[in-house]
Amino acid sequence: MPERLVIVGGDAAGMSAATQARRRRGSSELQIVAFERGRYTSYSACGIPYYVSGTVEDLESLIVRSPETFRKNNEIDAHINHEVTAIDVDARKVTVRDLANSVERTEGFDQLVIATGATPIKPNWPGIDTDGVFGVQVLGDGVAIRRWVDEEKPTRAVVIGGGYIGVEMAEALKVRGMDVTLVDMARQPMATLDQDMGALVAERMRDLGIDLFLEEPVLSIDNANGRASGVITEAREVPADIVVLGIGVRPNVELAEEAGIEIGTSGAIKVDRQMLTSADGVWSAGDCAEKFHRVSRRGVAIPLGTHANKEGRVAGINVGGGYETFPGVVGTATSKVCDVEVARTGLNESEATEAGFQFVTDTTDSTTRAGYFPDARPIKTKLVVEKQSGRLLGAQIIGEEGAAKRIDMLATALWNGMSVGQMLNLDLSYAPPFAPVWDPVLIAARKAWHLVEETARPKGGTPSPSLGEAQRELRRSPEETMQVDPE
Ligand SMILES: Cc1cc2nc3c(=O)[nH]c(=O)nc-3n(C[C@H](O)[C@H](O)[C@H](O)COP(=O)(O)OP(=O)(O)OC[C@H]3O[C@@H](n4cnc5c(N)ncnc54)[C@H](O)[C@@H]3O)c2cc1C
């Protein structure tokens, strides 16, 4: 008899685990069954805003693999419209509800992967279940929103919540020609950025014609004839023909919790480095699983597709009899609203404080190409750097085309525990169409290094010897250096 692997949740983490396990063990050795409560498997939730805006025309292009493809190409038995309602770890079985036929049955497993993702936060506001109010989490939500926009032709949209999903949805609805308002109880959109950087995003969004009402808790959603007609905040009523919720998510852990599986301090399922939970033969990956943050050294719940795919791969390799570990995350993320690109990695100021670091910060303005080159765009880079050691703790970028992906250089430096002193002479590429001679990342590192050196030096004394000779040679100001063009 082959062993039986059951997967709960048929998207990024679950199906990555399934396909990796299959690569290592054929169907005569391992039977793989996946249950997905929605209508789609292996889809790109990240593409939802672009499907709603029409940038991505075709829904099919957001579906990486259908259940049919899994069956045909991978011998994975994937069931859509099937919700797992209970896990019995001791009896090695799950209870599954066939949602199309309202029939419940039990299915046995030898190994289990819990990949249930995250649950959108849905406050208890009066009117929240009215037609025309939408959450954004699974592909079905994107389909429902686009249908409403196409068929009902709303002209006024309110997005509640200014996280990256809210901001991307605000852009999508703006692109569809609506008057868009974003309401948030926070002081700024993109609350994972520091306040100074978030305030810039707010300013740019207003420039793009999106109204922002910040620090305004929502009280209820008004309706006319059973359809959303406005959002009532503490300060006003904002008329709306469509309301989109982007209030954030929490790890979807109820099934695991009820099964007695340990939950970590972050609220996500506790896993070891192989993605094994506290229960023997039960693995977890993706948004529902806790991650180790390599900078704060704490367990975190950060819902990102990048992590979900990698964690699913690790779980699948281990289920398949291999050995793989997941080394943790630094929380690198990027997003955009119209032509404004936003990115972050590592810790922001409040996270660094909470993790017990003493640090300095520096913000640098530069351009994405040589300043004289056509289409050079502004880029603002903020670094959070540990005092004394100069170790990079976090970075944030706001800019235009060509800005955001520069966060990956900073994420790589962060991943490797580099100090801004070590980053100064990184051999990064340069040509006028791609960067100034000192890439914005290097200018930022250099400015931050100066600051670290200043704060490390006793008043009126010489620079700290720990910073090294090569670094001391580069004590000229970045502005001074930027004048030097090797061409
Ligand atoms: C609009 C949007 C934009 C995003 N953009 C980005 C981006 O640009 N970059 C990025 O890195 N990340 C992005 N993300 C986040 C990314 O999509 C998620 O981190 C990723 O999908 C998580 O994968 P997962 O497999 O852990 O969970 P999910 O993709 O949420 O999949 C979990 C699946 O489990 C199913 N499920 C849950 N409970 C049960 C049950 N009891 N029985 C059966 N099935 C169940 C759900 O229906 C769901 O399909 C975005 C998310 C959204 C919503």
Image (cartoon, rainbow, N blue to C red):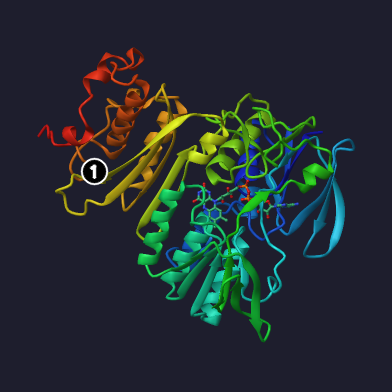
Residue at x-position 70% and y-position 57%: 80
Q: Is residue 174 above or below residue 291?
A: below
Q: In this view, does 389 lie to the left or right of 275?
A: left
The outermost residue toward the front is: 460
Please identify the quadrant where the C terminus is shown: top left
**Residue 420 in view of the camera:** yes
Q: Where is residue 404 in the image (x, y as percent from the top left)?
A: 37, 47
Amino acid on which the number 1 mark rests in the picture:
Phe
Element at badge 1? loop
Q: In this view, does 399 lie to the left or right of 485?
A: right
Q: Position of residue 298 (x, y in %)?
A: 61, 31
Residue under circle 1? Answer: 434
Residue at x-position 41% and y-position 49%: 197
* Label 1 neighbour load within 10 Å: few <14, some 14-19, many 20+: some
Q: Is residue 473 above or below residue 212?
A: above
Q: Where is residue 191 in the image (x, y as percent from the top left)?
A: 51, 51
